[in-house]
Image (tube, rainbow, N blue to C red):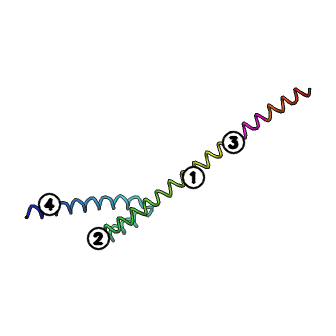
Amino acid sequence: MEDAQKSIQDKIKEQSGMLGQRLALLISLLNITDEQKGQLVKSLENMNSAELVEFYEILESKYLEAAGSEAKENFAKSLVSIKEDYDKKQKASFDKTMNALNDLEKKLQG
């Protein structure tokens, strides 16, 4: 019985440690000052396990949401860049073709 209880306690400690590491990582990635991060960590000390898990889940979802929107912005910027490059090349090709046609027209008239 004591072995089973010790095993459960070890698993709880392990899971708590993993949650702490994940929270630390997400907090370190926040776009806030180090002082604000320190205050946030201090406030975590007053939370129970369920509150910590809930806070982690909220923080993780907000991080993933922000990361997703950043990826969308980068993709949109890439598309704009590709379109601009395409438009420049298309204009250059059009100008070259028009110049060739103008030269041909001059030869035929002259």
**Mark number, residue 88:** 3
Nearer-N-terminus badge (2/1): 2
Nearer-N-terminus badge (1/4): 4
> Residue 60 at what x, y percent from top left?
39, 62
In the visual, does 77 lie left or right of 92?
left
Start-end of magenta stretch: 89-97
In the rendered image, residue 96 lying in the magenta stretch gets the answer: yes
Query: From mark 3 to mark 2, how far is it between C-alphas?
Result: 57 Å
Query: From mark 4 to mark 2, how far is it between C-alphas?
Result: 21 Å
The structure residue drawn at horizontal position 88% and vertical position 29%, both measured from the top left corner, is: 106
Residue under circle 4?
Answer: 7
Query: From mark 1 to mark 3, how far is it between C-alphas?
Result: 18 Å
Residue under circle 1?
Answer: 76
In the visual, does 65 lie left or right of 56?
right
Query: From mark 2 to mark 1, how far is it between C-alphas?
Result: 39 Å
Residue type, label 1: Ala
Mark 3, Cα crowd under 10 Å, few <14 / some 14-19 / many 20+, is few
CB contact under 8 Å: marks 1 and 3 = no
Residue 89 sits in which quadrant?
top right
Nearer-N-terminus badge (3/4): 4
